[in-house]
Image (cartoon, rainbow, N blue to C red):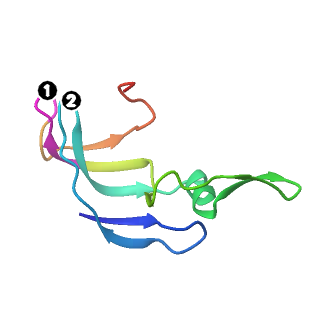
Amino acid sequence: MKAYQIVENGKPLEEREIEKPVPSGKEILLKTVACGVCHSDVHIHEGFFSLGDDAKLPVPLMTDALAMGHEIYGEVVELGDEVEGVEIGKKYVAYPWIGCGE
């Protein structure tokens, strides 16, 4: 699947082909329809948060490459085998800050 990722802070995003995740258990795979970019994404791309007065808090990349965006609207394309009450083809807004805790 296609992803646009940060490979180096402050540099343009790179288009890459990555392996499509396979949902298991209670996981759901959404095909992104739209994704917002907020200011935290900009800071992560830059590699730092400004603390004012020229002070900076570094934000190093956590992986080799990072796909940005955590404000997601997408269509359900696959379901894990334990998912109930969700239909393939339906569209949802994802709120990724609340997870299963694992």
Q: In this view, which residue lies farthest toward the right?
A: 53
Q: Is residue 21 magenta?
A: no
Residue at figure coordinates x 44%, y 48% from the top left: 71
* 51 left or right of 29 in image: right
Residue at figure coordinates x 56%, y 73% from the top left: 11
* 64 left or right of 22 in image: right
The amino acid pointed to by label 1 is Glu
Residue at figure coordinates x 33%, y 49% from the top left: 73
Residue at figure coordinates x 23%, y 35% from the top left: 27
Q: Which residue is mark 2?
A: 26
In this rendered view, identify the residue nearer to me: 32 or 100.
Answer: 100
Q: Which residues are magenta?
A: 75-86
Residue 26 locus on image (x, y percent): 21, 29
The amino acid pointed to by label 2 is Lys
Q: Which residue is mark 1?
A: 82
Residue 2 locus on image (x, y percent): 28, 66
Residue 58 locus on image (x, y percent): 69, 53
Q: Confirm or deny contact between disc 1 and disc 2 (CB under 8 A).
A: yes
* 8 left or right of 50 in image: left
In this rendered view, identify the residue nearer to me: 81 or 63.
Answer: 63
Helix, strand or loop at label 2? It is: loop
Quarter of the image with the N terminus in it: bottom left
Question: Marks 1 and 2, Cα distance to the nearest angstrom?
Answer: 5 Å
In this rendered view, identify the residue nearer to me: 47 or 29.
Answer: 47
